[in-house]
Amino acid sequence: MEGGIWAFYYLQGEDGEDRSHPNAYRLPGISPGADVTLADVLKSFPLRNPSAFHFRFRLNSSKGNTFYWLDVTQPTQKVPVAGGRVIIKLLRLERPQKPAKKKDVNLMSDSGWNDAPAVSAQPSSANSDFLSAMDPLAARAAPAAQTSPSKSVQRDPPKFDDDNGQTVGPVTMAEMQAHSKSTSDGSNVYNPNLVDKSTKSEDVRRAMEERERQVQRDVEKARDDLRKREEATRNMTAMKESANTVLGPKLKGWAEDNGRVKNIRTLLSTMHQVMWTDSKWSEVNMGKLIQPNDVKKHYRKAMIVVHPDKSGGRNAEQLLIAERVFAALNTAWDDFQKANPC
């Protein structure tokens, strides 16, 4: 049995196309559960010129009780898989032009050949009528005046009510993009807030309204969390500035000598003098910092203690000390490496 998954599609708003009776083709070489891209869909697409169509893919909601249409335009973008298959709604962007009807060519009349009787131009007997009827050339040579041009028949605009109410149409591409939301990867998700709820059943309408309320609650919660984080950041900044007035001179005297950062050996051997209690840093004797590799080892140990990634749970004073020690050690280490590459 040929491998791959099935792709079902229908052309939106075209005669003979219905969402309940879609067309189908197989995407070979794709195992169930694997990622599917737009390029995979286009590779086996049965219609000519796929660029003449806009592709929308069905995306089921997390609860499974509704779905949305996801617009995918880049070949490398992943397309959603609904129930183990790809469901596509196509919007034709370019209408194929119908070939112009060519005029029938009568070789006999064009060459000047005339099959009419030489004596009389009008048939005057039943025999001549019978012979004319038997002649295929005479039967095709009908006067153009007898065929009246058919009047143009106005057709109703295509119906767009076959897609679960997810589309408002007919619309242009510019209008569709104006009412869409862009995701981080550039794809567009059609805005469900534009769906007319009055066309839905009572259960569906209640579910839509509850979903909107839940979205609003999530937005309010995210806004409240952001407000709390910003307030905590402002408070921490204020407390660090206050701590700097007390600890700043001590940290500056430990790190600098006449405006220049001290060497790495001096900083590591005296680092215990400025660290806070329970900092997990113990005094390092200068005798353990003679060899460059020993300096490197203790520098890395110090980085583990004062690195910003390890700052969780510290108060303002501890954060200030860690930041100042971290900056001084890195500057001294860069100077040390220039003379002692290791």
Image: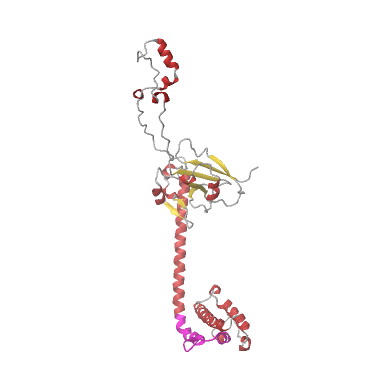
Quarter containing the C terminus: bottom right
**Residue 15: x %, y % from top left:** 46, 36
Q: Which residues are magenta?
A: 242-269
| Left or right, residue 328 beside residue 126 | right
Image point 45% across, 16% down: which residue? 134
Image point 45% across, 58% down: which residue? 219
**Residue 121: x %, y % from top left:** 35, 15
What secondary structure is the stretch in magenta mostly built from?
helix
**Residue 122: x %, y % from top left:** 35, 14
| Left or right, residue 138 beside residue 40 | left
| Left or right, residue 174 beside residue 274 | left
The residue at the far left in this view is 145
Residue 246 lies in magenta, yes or no? yes
**Residue 106: x %, y % from top left:** 41, 25
Vertically, is 303 above or below 82? below
Quadrant of residue 101 within the rendered picture: top left
Most foreground residue, 118 or 296: 118
Most foreground residue, 335 or 106: 106
Quarter containing the N terminus: top right
Most foreground residue, 9 or 167: 9
Q: Is residue 53 visible to the viewer in this orientation of the structure?
A: no
Most foreground residue, 124 or 225: 124
The residue at the far right in this view is 1
